[in-house]
Every structure is written in structure tokens, then in C-alpha cells.
Image (cartoon, grey):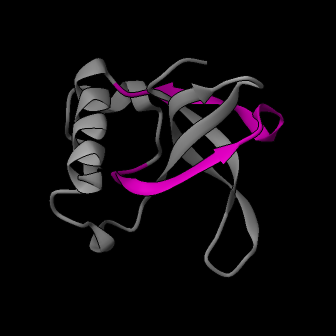
Amino acid sequence: MEEGSIIKVAFPQADGIIKFRPAVLIKKVPPYNDLMVCAVSTQIQTFVPGLDLIIQQEEKDFGQTRLKQSSIIRVAKLTTIPIKDVEGTIGNIGPTRYKQILVQLNVFLR
């Protein structure tokens, strides 16, 4: 599991229910190697331009994500979770898309 991995994690929902959902691993957080992740959603209609990233099934790198359908990476929907809450690795995003996440997060936080 490394930066850019798409993992299945116990993610808190807006209604307080915890569900296993895909997320992108952003960074390992010392000293306990907790994981900073951002949510992945299939709700394309909630896309926020300039903040979220779309991963379309038609894109050549979609296969490496191993997601089931086109999705958005919710760059600002961050959480830090203990590694024990990871059910497993699904796939990964490429280094270019990973850098896009960091850039968009940086712009958003400024």
C-alpha cells in the first residue's frame, strides 16, 4: 500500500453510518502510520470543478484503478484512519493523477 493506492476503507458517511468505500491513499501519517485518504464516489453529478477529479471508464489508465465505474475523487473529503480500518487494496491511480490531487488540494487550502 503506497501513495496513490485505491483502498477499501471504513469511511464515515454524512449520516454517521460507517461503510466500506473506496478511497485514495494520500499520505501515511506518523508516528503510527495512520492513513490520510480522500473519498472516491460514483456520484458524478456532485462533481466540483477545480476541486474534484473525474476518473472516466474511457480513459486508458482506468483499468489500473480497478474501480467498477466512472468515479470522482473527492479531493477535499479527507479523513485520517488507522491502518486496521483498511479492508484491502483495490488498485491505484497513476503518478500524474496523484500529483493533480496534491495540486488541487494545495490550491483549495490557500
* 53 in the magenta segment: no
* Left or right of 8 in this view: 86: right
| Occupied quadrant, residue 106 | top left
Callout count: 0
Residue 44 appears in the rendering: yes
Query: Where does the image place residue 3, in percent across and percent down from the top left?
Result: 48, 22
Looking at the picture, tell me which residue is in the foreground, 78 or 60.
78
Query: Where does the image place residue 99, in percent across and percent down from the top left?
Result: 26, 28
Looking at the picture, tell me which residue is in the foreground, 16 or 31.
31
Looking at the picture, tell me which residue is in the foreground, 35 or 41.
35
User: Is residue 91 positioned above or below 55 on the image?
Assistant: above
Residue 56 appears in the rendering: no
Residue extending farthest right: 84
* 85 in the magenta segment: yes
Residue placed at 56% from the left, 46% from the top? 22
* Left or right of 69 in this view: 97: left
User: Is residue 17 positioned above or below 105 on the image?
Assistant: below
Residue placed at 25% from the left, 55% from the top? 108
Magenta-tinted stretch: 69-93
| Occupied quadrant, residue 102 | top left
Query: Where does the image place residue 63, in percent across and percent down from the top left?
Result: 36, 28
Residue extending farthest left: 50
Residue placed at 75% from the left, 73% from the top? 17
Q: Mainly helix, strand or loop, the magenta region?
A: strand
Q: Quadrant of the N terminus?
A: top right
Looking at the picture, tell me which residue is in the foreground, 96 or 106.
106
Residue placed at 72% from the left, 61% from the top? 19
User: Is residue 58 positioned above or below 1 on the image?
Assistant: below
Query: Where does the image place residue 90, in percent across and percent down from the top left?
Result: 58, 31
* Left or right of 43 in this view: 16: right
* Left or right of 108 in this view: 93: right
